[in-house]
Image (cartoon, rainbow, N blue to C red):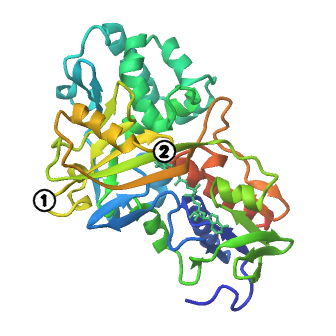
Amino acid sequence: MPSLNAGPPPDVLVIGAGLAGLACARDLRSAGIDARIVEASDGVGGRMRSDRYEGFVVDRGFQVFNTSYPQVRRRLALRELRLRPFTPGVLVHTDHGRLRFGDPTRGPRRLSALPAREVTVRDLLALGVLSARDALAPARVLKRAGERTTWTALAAAGFSDGFVETFFRPFLSGVFLEDELETSSRVFHLVWRSMLRGTLCLPTAGIGAVPALLADALPPGALHTETPVEQLTDGGALLGSGTEIGARAVVVATGPAGVAALLPGVEVPPYRVVTTYYHAAGASPLGEPTLLTDGRRRFLNTCVLSDVVPGYAPAGRSLIATSVLGTDTPGRESRVREALAEAYATGTEGWEPLTVRTVLDALPAMAPPQPLSRTTRVGPGRYVCGDHRATGSVQGALASGARAAREVLRDLGR
Ligand SMILES: Cc1cc2nc3c(=O)[nH]c(=O)nc-3n(C[C@H](O)[C@H](O)[C@H](O)COP(=O)(O)OP(=O)(O)OC[C@H]3O[C@@H](n4cnc5c(N)ncnc54)[C@H](O)[C@@H]3O)c2cc1C
């Protein structure tokens, strides 16, 4: 691979090879600009990476891939990811047993008998109205709607407290990584829409296959891993190696910690922390590729990853991922395993705690007022992109990278 400082300096230096940086560099390259990415770690993907661990595929924190995000549809040849779907809908573990909340648009057989105590006819009607509007209205209508917290929006939509506590709070806590339902209602409606219109799934090779596919389209010499940037300079950036790289424009696509270090004046929102426990078991405790949430809120969600993608575990083993808010603290794994024994209605003593992944900057907080997209220009020749400049999602990160490319191109007169 040509070295970074061989030949003329790049037009644009993109710092960080997460989704935002990859999208930005690809768009600049498509416009004929010499854009090069420098990435601190040993691979692409940032928060979206997968490791091979003792024969298992371990994503760096459990996450799902949604096929309906507009940026995903525009940029990725989905067939190459060999996607495996989750069952539409979720299971909720409650004091009265396990409830199935199916997606009625994909088959009524998926609705279980629901206890009248928690779910009223009015709730089901409200769910139908909300889902029909979110799925069918043009996205711009949802984007322009007034904003409040998700909790307030659900109450205004007519849902009972019982339904919110049984279904929405456990489910959305796992989506937004917060359990107060304080996320912007506009973000909630857009995410709900994307779930109704798309399929939640996982690539056969792990979630890291998504950024890897984006990176594959870059020409040789455009991406340099293990190349951390130490600081920005007047004409470019100073690498950790001590080499200065000049560039007409610099795009900081580093995630929140990198922005704080390289662009101290630029505001980043607080971030949500999540921990995923990975357990190995001899057999699947569920036997279906379905997300299970906890109405008692001892964990956010759990699923048998090897029921979704068999290749996530070696033959004869099952891989279970369970996420909780916050960090891994002493004794937490065994408390989670106790809750899982109840939720899966099975003994978990024989489960092997395989590994734990804590992500300190998993998702930006998105309480109202939450702009859906913000300019990436932060100074002459300086740009910043990432999920914190849009929404905390694959869609948000890619869209922010695309916006940075547009703004750079405009400023370069292209
Ligand atoms: C556990 C978890 C679950 C999630 N679940 C979902 C989900 O279900 N659906 C969804 O849509 N989204 C989900 N997300 C969010 C989604 O993964 C992120 O929004 C997105 O990946 C962020 O991409 P990014 O490019 O903005 O930043 P990042 O992925 O953080 O990329 C930043 C890159 O910059 C590099 N870097 C940092 N500093 C430097 C430096 N000084 N020099 C060079 N390089 C540097 C980093 O190594 C990294 O590769 C989840 C995230 C996590 C962590």
Residue 211 spot, x, y in % from top left: 47, 63
Q: Is residue 190 left or right of residue 295?
A: right
Q: Earlier in the sequence, mark 2 or mark 1?
A: 2
Q: Nearer the viewer, residue 106 or 32?
A: 106
On whether ligand 1 comes within 8 Å of the CB at mark 1, the answer is: no
Label annotation for residue 289: none
The amino acid at mark 1 is: Gly
Q: Which residue does the image show at 45% across and 37% down from the upper left?
A: 175
Circle 2 crowding by C-alpha within 10 Å: few under 14, some 14–19, many from 20: many
The amino acid at mark 2 is: Val
Q: Is residue 369 left or right of residue 381?
A: left
Q: Quadrant of the C terminus?
A: bottom right
Q: Which residue is mark 2?
A: 274
Q: Which residue does the image show at 46% across and 44% down from the upper left?
A: 329
Q: Is residue 193 above or below residue 379?
A: above
Residue 100 spot, x, y in % from top left: 24, 27
The part of the image, by quadrant, that contains residue 230 is: bottom right
Q: Nearer the viewer, residue 24 or 237?
A: 237
Q: Which residue does the image show at 54% across and 24% down from the upper left?
A: 150
State if disc 1 and disc 2 touch (CB < 8 Å): no
On whether ligand 1 comes within 8 Å of the CB at mark 2, the answer is: yes
